[in-house]
Amino acid sequence: MTENVAGFHDRLTKIVEEFVSNARAELSQRWAAWSVDITTPALHEVLGGLLARQVTLATQLARAPQTWNGHVAPLSLRAMTDGYITLAWILECPATRCDQYVKFGLGQKKLFLEHWKVHLTETGERNVENHPVIKAMEQWLNAERFHFLTEVSVGSWSETDTRSMAEEAGCLDLYRFGYAPLSAAVHNMWHHVIDYNLKTCQNPLHGSHRVPVDPDLAIDPDYLYRAAKYLDKSFRLFDRKTGVSVEVTRSIDALIDALNDALNTLNDSLPDPDMRGAPADNPAARAPE
């Protein structure tokens, strides 16, 4: 059985690399098929960049099986749900919201620059403006927009909350069943900590209080599936809103087929049915996200 498990891990590595290759092909094919209007470069850069970010988050998680657990995977998946909601909301009014998105980001970079200047001044730096960190950041900002023209906003870039963005963009289920529960891990909330970092004390005299624990968790391919699903949702959204149509292998379909084939092979080699894994895509176990 040990040999079969080792064989499954080797096969899983190949499955992951195929997924990465397919996901990147989906991105590049869409970019090639999208007619770029050079009079509105920010629109194409924002939408293309956000889509590429989804690919990066999914493929980086895919290549790190040790993170396919409730400790770490939710951090990447939460970022992907946030990325989807951001992309969907921008696509409701692309011209205005792309500009809004860019200006807020540049403002945050300028704010970081000002924090650095204060820090250097407080630590005794005599020539702050010529400090290599300051010069590098100002050069970066000026390449995008003159930093002295860049405004800093300390609120939300969208001037609304994420739930409202999701509702307006028609993806409230993703917010409810993806973004919100995954936020528990990101923000170290009590209902995440109690599930993953506390256990009941075994001393019967201690009143069943909980003690801290750092448990090792087995890898769960379902987290890979969810990353692939959020990426596929992003691709489908982009296609609907831009009218782009491509003939390319869907990375999620290839992943599901390959995972199910590998799991079936592994399951057939296990003597105990209770040890067998579930299919990679089990609709009955899926939240409506």
Image (tube, rainbow, N blue to C red):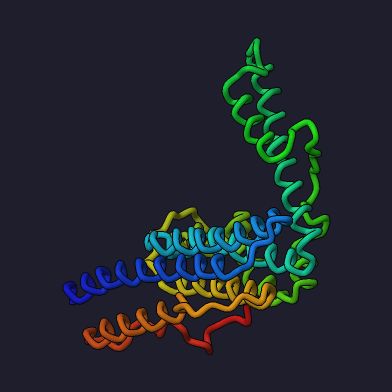
Q: In which quarter of the image is residue 192?
A: bottom right
In the depicted structure, whether residue 268 falls above or below residue 240:
below
- Residue 199's x, y, as percent? 48, 61
- Looking at the rendered image, the quarter that the C terminus falls into is bottom right
- Residue 18's x, y, as percent? 36, 70
In the depicted structure, whether residue 242 falls above or below residue 288:
above
Q: Quadrant of residue 65?
A: bottom left
Residue 138 visible to an observer of this rendering = yes
State the residue in front, 70 or 61. 61
- Looking at the rendered image, the quarter that the N terminus falls into is bottom left
Q: Quadrant of residue 49?
A: bottom right
In the depicted structure, whether residue 99 falls above or below residue 282:
above
Residue 184 visible to an observer of this rendering = no
State the residue in front, 142 or 222. 142
- Residue 258's x, y, as percent? 35, 80
Q: Residue at x 69, y 23 (%)?
A: 117
State the residue in front, 215 or 231. 231
Q: Which residue is drawn at 47% across and 74% down?
A: 225
Q: Residue at x 67, y 36 (%)?
A: 141
